[in-house]
């Protein structure tokens, strides 16, 4: 059964659809991502067919390079150009993996520089002030302190935090099980302070928010239902203002801060990728641009040509 139908020329379509089936069933990529890749590869195939390629198996590096160059002449956003090149590279690697081709025809291609901003990334001092903002011992204060600590400790997406259930939390062993994009499951460590805050909330906060029809959701509103993403957004902004952080702070900023601070502290990029639930290491690599001074220092310290004679 075809997972996604390609509109590419027939000679290209079979391999395209095999690849789309692979990323859908094996990699579990989101439907919107697969639909975008389908359009990108169909566009590439039509161009390549017009310029002498019979199918994906015969595409040359020069022909692939010409397609990428043609895109730079069109007025695509940089993110769209980067995605198109990613789709082509993933297809080429799939063809090699399946022994349909012997070489990767995208190996030497270079694409546009994708500069991503990291909105709301907080300093360690700002994070400390934010996490200290919920004060008092009432159920809502205990809840808010626990969710902010867990948010920063685990680097969850807002949707993942809102959807957490009691069954996903293992405080005894210090981790939570998260179901992210494409329903992929990952295990994320929880730091000591976050574990303590969640344990206090479970013992002294959540029981007071439970109503007769409450389910297993971890963080509850006053009606005993799960906190919504909108409510999480409002809570982060509320406590950022209370903490005296004057710039605009968004919930995703805590996720960015989590990754940035781990990287600054020397954590392995692959480990950060796993904790964030990124399908590709290239997505995680945006954080390497945040701390250029640290990278320069590492180069100066470890590169053999920088050592004293």
Image: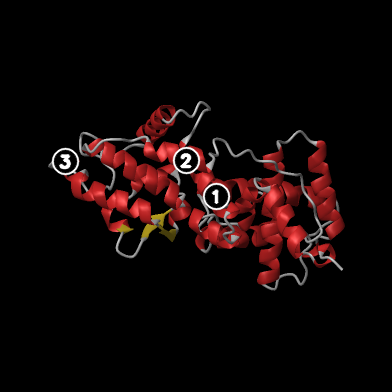
- Which labelled disc corresponds to residue 4? none
Label 3 or label 2, whichever comes before in sequence order:
2
Mark 3 packing: few (<14 Cα in 10 Å), some, or many (20+)? some
Residue 63 is left or right of residue 130, and the answer is: right
Q: Which residue is labeled 1 in the image? A: 261
Q: Is residue 73 above or below residue 189?
A: above
Residue 237 is left or right of residue 211, and the answer is: right
Residue 136 visible in the displayed image: yes
Camera-side residue of 282 and 121? 121
Q: Which residue is labeled 3 in the image? A: 208
Q: Position of residue 86 (x, y in %)?
A: 68, 52
Label 2 or label 1, whichever comes before in sequence order:
2
* Mark 2 and mark 1 residues within 8 Å of each other at the beta carbon: yes
How far is mark 3 from mark 2, CA to CA?
A: 28 Å
Local SS, label 1: helix
How far is mark 1 from mark 3, CA to CA?
A: 35 Å
How many numbered badges does the structure rendering display? 3
Q: Position of residue 151 (x, y in %)?
A: 41, 46
- Which labelled disc corresponds to residue 127? 2
Q: Position of residue 258 (x, y in %)?
A: 50, 48
Residue 57: image quadrant is bottom right
Q: Residue at x 34, y 46 (%)?
A: 163
Q: Is residue 119 above or below residue 82?
A: above
């Amino acid at each position: 059964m075809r997972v996604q139908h390609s509109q590419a020329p027939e000679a290209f379509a079979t391999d395209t659809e095999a690849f789309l089936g692979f990323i859908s069933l094996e990699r579990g990529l989101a439907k919107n991502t697969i639909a975008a890749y389908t359009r990108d590869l169909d566009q590439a195939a039509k161009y390549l067919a017009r310029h002498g390629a019979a199918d994906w198996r015969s595409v040359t590096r020069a022909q692939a390079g010409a397609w990428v160059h043609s895109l730079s002449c069109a007025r695509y956003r940089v993110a769209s150009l980067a995605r198109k090149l990613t789709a082509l590279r993933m297809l080429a690697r799939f063809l090699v993996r399946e022994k349909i081709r012997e070489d990767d025809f995208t190996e030497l291609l270079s694409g546009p520089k994708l500069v991503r901003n990291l909105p709301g990334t907080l300093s360690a001092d700002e994070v400390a002030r934010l996490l200290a903002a919920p004060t008092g011992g009432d159920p809502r204060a205990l809840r808010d302190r626990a969710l902010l600590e867990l948010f920063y400790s685990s680097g969850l997406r807002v949707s993942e935090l809102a959807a957490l259930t009691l069954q996903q939390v293992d405080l005894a062993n210090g981790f939570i099980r998260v179901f992210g994009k494409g329903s992929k499951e990952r295990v994320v460590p929880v730091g000591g302070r976050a574990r303590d805050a969640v344990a206090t909330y479970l013992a002294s906060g959540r029981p007071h928010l439970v109503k007769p029809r409450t389910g297993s959701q971890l963080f509850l509103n006053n009606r005993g239902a799960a906190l919504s993403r909108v409510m999480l957004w409002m809570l982060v902004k509320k406590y950022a203002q209370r903490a005296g952080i004057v710039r605009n702070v968004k919930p995703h900023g805590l996720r960015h801060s989590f990754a940035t601070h781990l990287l600054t502290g020397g954590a392995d990029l692959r480990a950060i990728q796993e904790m964030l639930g990124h399908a590709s290491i290239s997505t995680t690599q945006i954080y390497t641009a945040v701390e250029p001074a640290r990278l320069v220092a590492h180069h100066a310290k470890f590169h053999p040509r920088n050592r004293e004679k």
